[in-house]
Image (cartoon, rainbow, N blue to C red):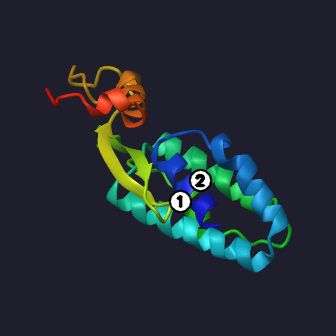
Amino acid sequence: MEELARAVKRTYFAWEPFSTVEEGLREFLERQEEEECLTLQAKLVRELLDGSRRFPVHPDCGRRFLRRLAVTLERRDGLEVSEELYKASLAADDPQGRQRFFYKSYFIGDDDDGDSACCVSLAESRELVSVGGATGLRTWEAATAFLAWARSSKAAKTLGRG
């Protein structure tokens, strides 16, 4: 259950589509007793919604993800979906559009317990050019590819050593 909860959390805060974790979640819900499913739901609601208060994800991504999560949980016979999750999936975060950027999180590595060794949350925008004409509120795809290469490459470990 912990591994699944971690995968859902990473997917949500990285603005990735729900389909990334949907199959694993469905399989878990089918195999487990109702009590385990309720425990997972409570953990997800707590971690996703509490984390969103501190590092708000883009409202479109967040609502879409939480709606799909609620629907997937509803499909499990006998499982009552949390009212807090329903409210969050219907909420109109920042309806006036005051907030120009939101936080996208990148999880780097795993520690011995399986938790992320490092989480970097960056203020980002989905727009290429912001309202004021500024650029730079997006992470380059090449940067994440470089990080993956650098973490796995022996040659990268010697960079900067002269």
Q: Amino acid at mark 2?
A: Leu
Q: Is residue 101 left or right of residue 89?
A: left
SS of the residue under disc 2: helix
Residue 42: percent from the left, percent from the top? 59, 73
Residue 28: percent from the left, percent from the top? 76, 61
Which quarter shows the N terminus? bottom right
Determine crowd level at label 2: few under 14, some 14-19, many 20+ residues with C-alpha closer than 10 A: many
Q: Amino acid at mark 1?
A: Ala
Is mark 2 in CB contact (under 8 Å) with mark 1?
A: yes
Q: Is residue 104 left or right of residue 157?
A: right
SS of the residue under disc 1: helix
Can residue 5 be seen?
A: yes
- Residue at coordinates 38% horizontally, 22% vertically from top-left? 142
Can residue 101 be seen?
A: no
The residue lying furthest to the bottom in this view is 35
Q: Provide the residue designation for mark 1.
A: 88
Which quarter shows the C terminus? top left
Q: Provide the residue designation for mark 2.
A: 66
Residue 85: quadrant of the picture: bottom right
Residue 139: percent from the left, percent from the top? 34, 29
- Residue at coordinates 59% horizontally, 47% vertically from top-left? 65
- Residue 145 higher or lower than 82, as above or below: above
